[in-house]
Amino acid sequence: MRNSSFALVTGASQGLGRVFAHALAARKQNVILVARSRDKLENLANELKRSQSVFAEVLEFDLASPSAGPRLAQQLRDRNLQVNLLVNNAGFGVRGEFRNLALQRQMEMLRLNNAAVVELTYSLLPSLMEHPQAGIINVSSSAGFQPITLCPGRILANGHSGEAKNGNRKFGFVYQSSEDVVREALDSLANGGGLVIPGFVNKLSVFAQRLIPRRAVPALVAKMSRQ
């Protein structure tokens, strides 16, 4: 076997997760298949072993349950499975009016789409960093771009004296006061609502991100986040 480490694919029983598993196995990457449907996972694992001659491990697991990420990471350690690629693909969306959807189902959606991604990534990151070619793929949704939210930038943190604690930062000009952000949000609401990106600098930065290479964005954000 060329590779003794594994790619972990969540939500692997169907849809994008299943396609990820096939594509990775075709590249001779061993895979760990995670979902709630054991039968589907085992059928997929057998198919990949037979057609691609890779190792394919099955973990029946509900990532929408509380503290799912750390518990899944512990199972991997117990089975001595080394992960060099994490594909956070599991997720779902409920449709309908917010008030008519069961709260429990909506909380499951939040745990799976958000908490599980953070927990699992955090839990696996130390071992991932031991691999020189490690990677993480987070599958999101274009719904994140829909204009239904308030998206402020960096907010000034006021001290007891009322002076901004972070006014001496190198990129202090990108910070806004809370009052300005709230005012723009309420003004937008009064005019029908929609996407709100308060402040000229923030609007400019969002527009600029469309023009500069995407690979450069994380490095730029990291630089601006340092003291």
Image (tube, grey):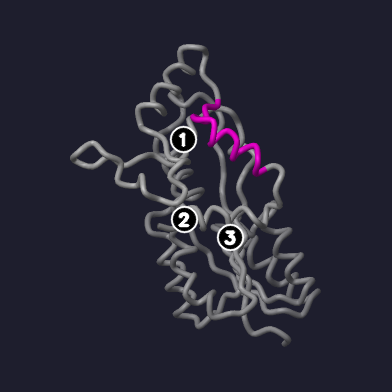
Q: What residue type is labelled 1?
A: Pro
Q: Give the residue displayed 65% in from the left and 72% down from the top.
A: 31
What secondary structure prevails in the magenta region?
helix
Number of other residues with Cα within 10 Å of mark 3, as a class: few under 14, some 14 to 19, many 20 or more: many
- Relative horizontal placement of residue 27, taking residue 146 as reference (left or right): right
User: Does residue 222 lie above or below 59 as drawn?
Assistant: above
* Magenta range: 195-209
Above or below 122: residue 149: above
Q: Mark 2 points at which residue?
A: 116
Pinpoint residue 111: horizontal percent, then vertical percent: 44, 49
Q: Mark 3 points at which residue?
A: 10
Label 2 is placed on what type of residue?
Ala
CB within 8 Å, label 3 to label 2: yes
> Mark 2 or mark 3, which is nearer the start of the sequence?
3
x and y percentages locating residue 127 in the rendered image:
50, 77
Are the residues tagged 1 and 2 within 8 Å (C-beta)? no
Q: How crowded is mark 1: few (under 14 residues within 10 Å), some or many (20 or more)?
A: many
Tell which tag, 1 or 2, sits nearer the viewer.
1
Question: Residue at coordinates 72% horizontally, 79% vertically from top-left?
Answer: 54
- Residue 74, image quadrant: bottom left
- Look at the image and say whether residue 221 sits in the magenta stretch: no
Q: Which of 56/167 is in front?
A: 167
Amino acid type at mark 3: Thr
Q: Is residue 177 above or below residue 14?
A: above
